Amino acid sequence: MRTPIIAGNWKMFKTIAEATDFAKQLTATKAIEGVEQVICAPFTTLSALAGILQGTPYALGAQNVHFADQGAFTGEISPLMLKEIGVKYVIIGHSERRQYFNETDETVNKKVIAALSHGLLPIVCVGESLAEFESGSTEQVVRTQTEAALNGLTSDQVKQVVIAYEPIWAIGTGKSSTAEDANKTIGYIRGCVERAFGAEAAAAIRIQYGGSVKPDNIEGYLRQSDIDGALVGGASLTVDGFVQLVAGASAARG
Ligand SMILES: O=C[C@H](O)COP(=O)(O)O
């Protein structure tokens, strides 16, 4: 049985003061069990958050990482640096990074390998654009992205990876995929993992849905057979929203 995982992706929101305030409020609420909970925060807030979240049920995530340990890469952050802070998860290949920062399938793969080699757990984002969705290319797109991201990993490494299926047209738009459609695509991704890495890896890997997930629709996603959680942007920015998302996931798994 795969443990559901709810990850909040704060994107480029929250100062250190705001992040600290959020974490103090969150850790003061009664923790919900049975759901893994992750906050993926801006780099500048990670140290402060690590101090507050250490020893709590809430894991810390980053939103990007470079693939090198160190070097002349101005403005970048290495896996070693994240590990030193106490970061557990790192989002890799979010569509906003693919779209605005030239992230490619090749760099995503290098980052996944680098993260795992340093004990960081990747949350790898895949998903199709609106044009690709409308032309019926969703499966082809997610297969290419998934196979490229996991290229060269062992099946034991694949079991540690989280994939987030995020249709780009559903991100921040309020237009979410139906739970049934998301489950179908996620089932297809799991099939791709099985063909490349075997049944055991496919059964173990967790695959989230992301794209306009809210407290009032999360239960529908988590009730699906192949959806193991959610990567949530906007609705994860308030403590109340985040807690309701986790409560919804917990209720769905009942
Ligand atoms: O990483 C999260 C996704 O981009 C979804 O964002 P959203 O929940 O604001 O649509």
Image (cartoon, rainbow, N blue to C red):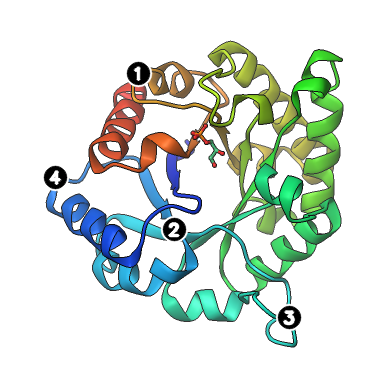
Residue type, mark 4 in image: Lys
Residue type, mark 2 in image: Ala
Which residue is at a point 25% across and 53% down the rendered structure image?
22
213 or 186: nearer the viewer: 213
Disc nearer the start of the sequence (4/1): 4
Q: Which mark is residue 73?
A: 3
Q: Which mark is residue 216?
A: 1
In the image, residue 193 above or below residue 216: below
114 or 135: nearer the viewer: 135
Q: Pinpoint residue 191: horizontal percent, then vertical percent.
A: 75, 30
Which residue is at a point 32% across and 72% down the rendered structure image?
48
Q: Is mark 4 within 8 Å of ligand 1?
A: no
Name the residue carrying label 4. 30
Give me the C-alpha separation between circle 3 and circle 2.
21 Å
254 or 233: nearer the viewer: 233
Quadrant for the C terminus in the image = top left
Give me the C-alpha separation between circle 1 and circle 2.
23 Å
Q: Pinpoint residue 170: horizontal percent, then vertical percent.
A: 60, 25
Disc nearer the start of the sequence (3/1): 3
Disc nearer the start of the sequence (2/4): 4
Q: Secondary structure at mark 3?
A: loop
In the image, residue 110 above or below residue 4: below
Q: Pinpoint residue 29: horizontal percent, then vertical percent.
A: 14, 46
Name the residue carrying label 2. 41
Residue 164: quarter of image: top right
Residue type, mark 1 in image: Asp
Give me the C-alpha separation between circle 2 and circle 4.
22 Å
Give me the C-alpha separation between circle 3 and circle 1.
42 Å
